[in-house]
Every structure is written in structure tokens, then in C-alpha cells.
Image (cartoon, rainbow, N blue to C red):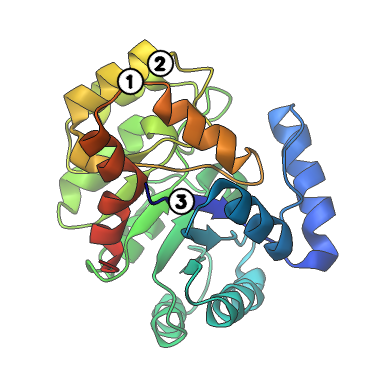
Amino acid sequence: MRYFDIHAHIFPDKIAAKVVSTLESFYNFTWNGTGTVSDLLANMDKASVERAVIFSCATKPEQITAANSFLSDTQQRYPERFCAFGTIHPDCPDIDGVLKDIKERGLRGIKLHPDFQQIYIDEPAMMRIYGKLDATLPLIIHMGDPRTDFSSPHRLARVLERFPDLVVIAAHFGGYKEWDQAWKHLVGKNVFLDTSSSFPLLSPEEAVRIIRAHGVEKILFASDYPASDLENAIGDILKLGLSPQENEQIFHLNAERILGTL
């Protein structure tokens, strides 16, 4: 079996420990990895994961250039291992310039983390950004958290209704700890769901029900490194008892189709 991880966070070595500590405090559990490029590569090698989508998020507009430069440089250093997604922020005064820079750097998509970026998925500024995108820049969006409303599934449903041609990956089976809302607003819609940071909070039985209802062709393997160990993330999928053909779609074929790496 081949493995393509659609969801891995990385940070420059000098700030990785600080960022991971902040994330651990926010989510109230100890993360598995250090968040550095070298540690992710070691994790990938241990789990026999061929490729991963990597990203970081700018919480302020002034962080965009440095973050996208770091991601682009990392992708260029390891072109056979990484596909990098860029970051953007709606408060940036030159959205067109950022999108042009993302494409010129060869970044393969855009990652949004509404909770940390303090943006509502369907706010007007974000809607204007979506209107500038096309299928060449897929979006991966952190989804769900009952403590906030920035990334609620119902907000993404509004985006999908207005922009049906957007290629969107809704992380955490469509809504971290809000899978009832994901069922109501996203399951069965024209959106990909990734498997990151959902087990054991989401039971295997419920995960299979979502996969069957949504369609295995729209489910993507995701570790959420450094929150999770890649071997454990693979094991969580294997425990679901899906067919070899279904596992192959989830573990690599669907991601390769989105990113054109077949």
C-alpha cells in the first residue's frame, strides 16, 4: 500500500517548539511530533508514507511572505516528499499579489485555520478570496470546534453553495467534535473530508457510516502531524475494516487525483 498524507503542519526549527507548545495548550493534549521538517521526514519514513501535504498558517498578514517562502523552500528541497500549500489572510491589503506569489512559488493549494486566524469561513472578505480561486488551488480548511464558531460546518456549506467549483478539503471528517453538524451540512456534498485528529473521539462505526454516506472517493488520509504519529493514523484507518480497494482510494488515490500526481 502507498500512503499520501494530506494534512501535516511544519514550522521553522527556531520557532517549532514554541508553536507546538501553544497548540498543545489550545487543544489540551500533548502532541506527538516536534513540528520540524526533519522530524516529519523521520515520521514519514518510519510509517512508509511517500508524500505529505505540508502547510503553516499566518495569523497576521505580515506573516504571509515568510511562511510561504519557508513552505516553498521546503517543497523545493524535497520535491519527491512534499506538496506545500500556502497561507493567506483576508486582512492582507494585496490579496491578488499574494495569490500570484503563491502560484509563482509553485505552492499547490491554500490552507486556512479559521480558529487561529480569527476568521469566519463565510465572512465577506473570505468570499471575495474564494471568488478569485480556481481548481488549480485547492483549499484545505480546519473544520469544527464547539468552543468557537469560526469554522462551523454550516458556514462551509454556505461557501460550497455559492462557489460549487471550489476544490475544498474539510479537515477532521468535516468538523472536529462537531460531527453531528458535519452530518447535517457537509456529508454528501461536493467536498472532500480528511481523517485527521478524529480518532478515538469519533468511533470506528461512526467513521465508516460517514465514509459510506459521503463516498469513499471523497475521503482523504490525514495524520495532522505533529498532533499525531503517522503510523497510528494509518492504523486508525486500517481498523475500520474497509476493503483493500477502499483503503487504496483513501490512502493515496484520492489525494493524487486532486493534486495531479498520478
Q: CA distance from mark 3 to mark 2?
A: 19 Å
- Asked whether residue 149 appears in the rendered view, the answer is no
Residue carrying label 1:
241
Q: Mark 2–mark 1 contact, CB under 8 Å? A: yes
Counting from the top left corner in percent of width and height, residue 50 is at 47, 59
Seen from the viewer's position, the closer of residues 77 and 91 is 77
Would you place residue 222 above or below residue 40 in this image? above
Quadrant of residue 36 within the rendered picture: bottom right
Q: How many residues crowd mark 3 within 10 Å: few (<14), some (14–19), many (20+)?
A: many
Which residue shows up at 48% across the image and 36% down it? 234
Residue carrying label 2:
204
Q: Quadrant of the C terminus?
A: bottom left
Would you place residue 64 above or below residue 101 in this image? above
Which residue shows up at 34% across the image and 48% down it? 169
Q: Earlier in the sequence, mark 3 or mark 2?
A: 3
Element assignment for label 2 = helix
Quadrant of residue 207 within the rendered picture: top left
